[in-house]
Image: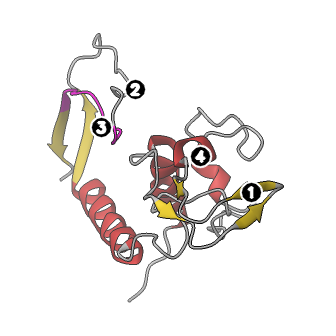
């Protein structure tokens, strides 16, 4: 049996876009001299894709700092094909080979967890810090949450 949960898929995509857990993609190396958008890139140059910038660029995303899963849905609520500016698993020939497996696993994990549990703030007065510390990976700061069974 196959279920269609486009809002769940869109929410996962938006979490990956907004978090940009790996803000800089995997390094690539130019194998030959080339020109891209008027820039000359010499053979041997190391190239690093700035995924954080791509995922937070206001030229491509309306209100990029806001959490909005609707940006991945059509007006009728169907999941849209991901835009070119969305690449949480990097880009090019060296992008993550496990992307499909990771997305399937995330979908199963998220749907299963939210099917069986309710999540609420542990302390309503505690302010949630959304900006992660600087580093190679964007890891959230610790926070407390109350988890209770749905049934």
For the residue carrying disc 3, how many other residues have a C-alpha within 10 Å: few (<14), some (14-19), or many (20+)?
A: some
Query: Which of marks 1 and 4 precedes in the sequence?
Result: 1
* Image depth: mark 1 or mark 2 in front: 1
Going 18% across and 53% down the picture, which residue do you hit? 151
The residue labelled by disc 3 is 139
Work out how far the residue at label 4 is from the one at label 2, CA to CA, in angstroms.
16 Å
Residue toward you, 57 or 146: 57
The residue labelled by disc 1 is 40
Q: Would residue 55 appear left or right of 142 to someone viewing this image?
A: right
Work out how far the residue at label 1 is from the one at label 2, CA to CA, in angstroms.
38 Å
**Dominant SS in magenta:** loop
Query: Which of marks 2 and 4 precedes in the sequence?
Result: 4
The residue labelled by disc 4 is 55
For the residue carrying disc 1, how many other residues have a C-alpha within 10 Å: few (<14), some (14-19), or many (20+)?
A: few
The residue labelled by disc 2 is 130
Dividing the picture into quarters, in which one does residue 35 lie?
Answer: bottom right
């Amino acid at each position: 049996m196959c279920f269609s949960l486009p809002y769940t898929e869109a929410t996962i995509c938006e979490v990956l876009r907004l978090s940009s857990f790996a803000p800089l993609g995997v390094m690539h190396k130019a194998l030959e001299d080339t020109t891209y958008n008027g820039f000359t890139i010499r053979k041997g140059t190391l190239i690093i894709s700035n995924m954080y910038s791509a995922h937070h660029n206001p030229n491509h995303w309306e209100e990029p700092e806001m959490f909005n899963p609707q940006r991945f849905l059509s007006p009728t609520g169907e999941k849209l094909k991901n835009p070119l500016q969305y690449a949480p698993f990097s880009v090019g020939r060296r992008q993550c080979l496990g992307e499909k497996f990771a997305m399937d696993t995330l979908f199963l994990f998220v749907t299963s967890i939210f099917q069986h549990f309710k999540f609420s703030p542990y302390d309503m007065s505690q302010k949630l810090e959304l900006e992660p510390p600087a580093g190679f990976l964007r890891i959230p700061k610790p926070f407390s949450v109350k988890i209770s069974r749905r049934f």
